[in-house]
Image (cartoon, coloured by chain):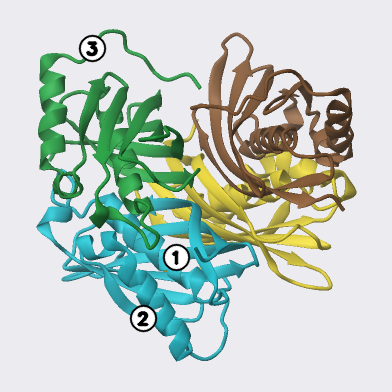
Chain colours: A cyan, B green, C brown, D yellow
Amino acid sequence: MSPVDSGGGLSAEQDARLRESIGRQTLLTTLGIRVAALEPGRVVLELPFRADLCQQNGFVHVGAITTLADSACGYAAMSLQPPDCDILTVEFKVNLLRPAVGQRFHATATVVRAGRTLTVCAAEVVSEGDDSRPIALMQATLMAMPAA
Amino acid sequence: MSPVDSGGGLSAEQDARLRESIGRQTLLTTLGIRVAALEPGRVVLELPFRADLCQQNGFVHVGAITTLADSACGYAAMSLQPPDCDILTVEFKVNLLRPAVGQRFHATATVVRAGRTLTVCAAEVVSEGDDSRPIALMQATLMAMPAA
Amino acid sequence: MSPVDSGGGLSAEQDARLRESIGRQTLLTTLGIRVAALEPGRVVLELPFRADLCQQNGFVHVGAITTLADSACGYAAMSLQPPDCDILTVEFKVNLLRPAVGQRFHATATVVRAGRTLTVCAAEVVSEGDDSRPIALMQATLMAMPAA
Amino acid sequence: MSPVDSGGGLSAEQDARLRESIGRQTLLTTLGIRVAALEPGRVVLELPFRADLCQQNGFVHVGAITTLADSACGYAAMSLQPPDCDILTVEFKVNLLRPAVGQRFHATATVVRAGRTLTVCAAEVVSEGDDSRPIALMQATLMAMPAA
């Protein structure tokens, strides 16, 4: 794959804009998701394990892993858009590679194709703990909208 | 589409088995997701709006909507499997049709194809409130595993 | 699901416009795909079995089935757009439900959500022969563009 | 992403087995698809442009591009399976990044996760000509079956 790379880091304004938007996502706070890295066209979000985020066997629920990956894709897309743009998810697809076992999970999203209207992102979610392994793969389409 | 229909309702044992498994999904409790209907090959789960489940514009986060739809698909698949089987999500795809605005959301999952190993489900999520409309569509693949 | 239904049939102009565009799709001619029904928001395309369209076991190749379903989705989307619009596929997801065995295959595509820019369609492909069964399910996103 | 890599090249038997199976896929011959590289966990297939494989604007049809990518994923999966196994596609998702313009297209598929029953692959399709660019991205699930 050939992620879109825009060279240097985010400007202070872009960084602040992304963090402000992330701060307004109340589900991220509810689940304990936080920022690990914000770069142009690449965002890493982190989810520490919590016993109240699990499915029936004590693995982290696919829904929490998807929230992590979708949010990383959204902000990777937003990082390449002008400041007056908001981003909405159009659709995504997730493959679960292994049960979500670990002390912490990182989703790394990269922009594969940035258009004026539509952006395509790919994200990989990796578990961390005794064993660090890819657990999920997302391919997502996002849409730029004038900010409300 | 031609959902798989197995005739009458769930047996008391099947119903209890599904509810017991749903009760062990701690993320569902954390998000406030509850059972609306359990039938063979068709499950409806419900998510009331909460301000702490939102994305940056105050719509319910795609991650919460996906958790709702994925869980409905999982239990629709499990409803057609023998009692000693557990269900894991292999993959899914979600299209977001409209922003998730409403007082309550229902995901209705139906089994489209039940195999011994793999089950394919479709789910529709509908908002309820002043206006009741489809907001998301999921197509999912699930895998039966011997219960742990 | 709640397909978008626009009431009566296609106007003669719309019908001609869709058939003219279909006629320009040379791959459809190469594979032998033809129109079975054109309605507003619903298109059925047909593919007769041919031995030169198969995979390694003599089933019709997933690629031919996908071409059938994708084209049906594209024209279902175009049927609800103004005459000066062309349609491009943004993305789709296909679940294969059974091997593509049969004398003929029909893809029925319906518009689930028609926006000004993006349209979401669902398509089901059914085999016909001794046994008539759903063999594939598509969920697709299409984009309206000003016609070239 | 972390493609599965099994070290050296394919054995002569594996190579022959894959080529024999590819040779039986009549649709590949019909479309002009041929092998560019066969390695353990990585397969490249090639499709030269032909005017009879197009959509309404003269771009190569998404269905032909999908056939290319799906077949590459299938043989990447098969390359890591024992000789008595056949591979069937369970599902895939394709994002179209740009119109398929070019003299030739390559799909490179890599195995992301090889299980005993299910294999997950990712494929990228690149155009070649005046300009070489990624035009499509596939994420696919395949299933190993005892060979007929």
Answer with mark 2 or mark 1, whichever residue precedes in sequence. 2
State the residue in front, B10 or D65: B10
Task: Name the amino acid type tagged 3.
Answer: Gly
The residue identified by callout 1 is A73
Label 3: few (<14), some (14–19) or many (≥20) C-alpha neighbours in 10 Å? few
Which mark, residue C68? none
Q: x, y (%) of residue B66?
A: 35, 46
The total number of labels drawn is: 3
Chain bearing tag 2 is: A
State the residue in front, B27 or A126: B27
The residue identified by callout 3 is B9
Chain bearing tag 1 is: A
* Label 1, label 3: how far apart the Cα atoms are: 41 Å
In the rendered image, the vertical position of residue A8 relative to residue D122, given as above or below: below
The residue identified by callout 2 is A37
Query: Does dot 3 land on a helix, a strand or a loop?
Result: loop
Residue drawn at (54%, 17%) of the image: C133
* Label 2, label 3: how far apart the Cα atoms are: 50 Å
Whether callout 1 and callout 3 share a subunit is answered no
Q: x, y (%) of residue A58?
A: 13, 51
In the rendered image, the vertical position of residue A69 relative to residue A78, given as above or below: above
Which image quadrant is residue B84 in? top left
Please, which residue is most extreme toward the front here?
B130
* Label 2, label 1: how far apart the Cα atoms are: 12 Å
